[in-house]
Image: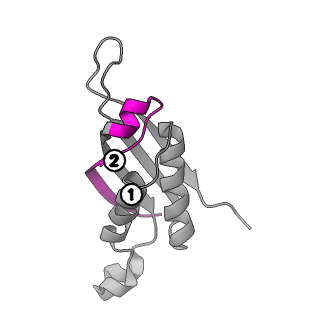
Amino acid sequence: MDKLLVNGLEFVGPHGYYAEERAEGRRFRVDLVAEVSTRRPGVSDALEDTLDYRELAGIVVEIGQGPSHHLIESLVEAMCAAILGRHGAVQAVEIRLVKFADGVPGDPESVGIWVRREREAG
């Protein structure tokens, strides 16, 4: 399977366990890999034959700026489910989500999660 990439997508969203995170918002960065066949658009050179990466980015931003999630696990799960649910051609999606967090011991630049979800057979 081929892979479409969206790297370094950023947004501010109302996500976090603590009330101040949800009220103030936090900055996030996403790298996304969508597994999809690119054979047809590779031959046709037609946008209508491919999954436009602007649609993938739009889904991530829509969910990222949408209703609050307490956990980044829940946030990234919603992103994966939306991509797989809206685009039948996507066989699997991998998302690396980074949260620029304040108040974490050791003062890391960021925290995050990296998940892969595949379309369920049947």
Whether residue 23 is visible:
yes
Q: Secondary structure at mark 2?
A: strand
**Quarter holding residue 42:** bottom left
Which quadrant of the rendered structure holds the C terminus? Answer: bottom right
Within the magenta stretch, is there residue 21? yes
**Towards the viewer: 19 or 91:** 19
**Residue range (magenta):** 1-23
**Towards the viewer: 22 or 105:** 22
How would you rate the neighbour count of disc 2 (Cα within 10 Å): few for under 14, some for 14-19, many for 20 or more?
Answer: many
Residue 65 placement (x, y as % from top left): 36, 54
**Quarter holding residue 111:** top left
Looking at the rendered structure, the kind of residue marked 2 is Val
Q: Return the disc, 2 or 1, that comes first in the chain's sequence.
A: 2
Q: Is residue 90 above or below residue 39?
A: above
Q: Which mark is residue 105?
A: none
Name the residue that disc number 1 marks: 60
Residue 27 placement (x, y as % from top left): 28, 40
Residue 11 placement (x, y as % from top left): 28, 50
Q: Which mark is residue 30?
A: 2
**Towards the viewer: 78 or 47:** 78
Q: Are marks 2 and 1 in contact (CB under 8 Å)?
A: yes
Q: Identify the residue at the far top of this view.
A: 106
The residue drawn where x is 31% and y is 83% is 47
The residue drawn where x is 49% and y is 43% is 69
